[in-house]
Image: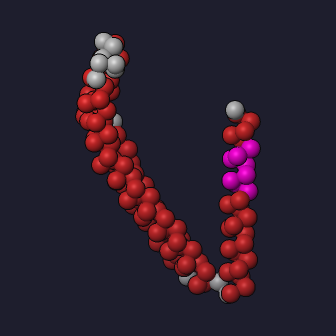
Amino acid sequence: MVDKVQRTTIQEEKHLSGKMAKLQETVADATLVELAHEATEIMKNNEVHEGGADDHMERVESTLASKEEGLEKILHKADDLRMKTLRNITQILSPLQAVHFLIAAAELHLRVHDWGKKKDALSN
């Protein structure tokens, strides 16, 4: 039972990783590279204060909007997979085991969060 949950989860993780990789490849597509070059030219020519940057920023935002939507969809699917996996695990466990598992998962989450905060504080 646990093996089946693990295999299914790994397959779905690989699928999501593939989607994320494809999305990441589109971030460096020709349109964004062209926009980056244009931004450099705007900065060189001091067009920032003359309104040249306004049109450019609108184009950047519209180009990034679709990529943002794609990322949002992938993140929602990843969240759904986490919840599905959690439900499947807790259904396999006895009620007492499930409670202990959820407590341990929450403690791990909190400790990793605290560790990240401490690490950020040290690097600042």
Q: Residue drawn at (54%, 79%), measured in percent from left and top?
A: 88
- Left or right: where 93 falls relative to 27: right
Total residue callouts: 0
Is 117 within the magenta?
yes
Q: Nearer the viewer, residue 58 or 18?
A: 58
Where 19 sits versus 64, above or below? below
Measured from the top left, where is residue 57 in percent x and y? 31, 32
Residue 101 is one of the magenta-drawn residues: no
Q: What are the residue bounds of the magenta stretch?
A: 111-118
Seen in the picture, residue 43 relative to 22 is either above or below; the reply is above
Q: 9 above or below 72?
A: below
Which residue reaches farthest top? 45
Q: Residue furthest front?
A: 50
User: Where does the image place residue 29, in percent across and percent down from the top left?
Assistant: 28, 37
Q: Foreground residue, 80 or 65? A: 65
Residue 60 is at least partly visible in this image: yes
Q: Is residue 121 above or below residue 11?
A: above
Could you tell me if residue 14 is visible in this image? no
Quadrant for residue 120, please give it. top right
Q: Which image quarter: residue 102?
A: bottom right
Quadrant in the rendering for residue 16 = bottom left
Residue in view at x 46 percent, y 69 percent: 80
User: Looking at the figure, which quarter contains the N terminus?
Assistant: bottom right
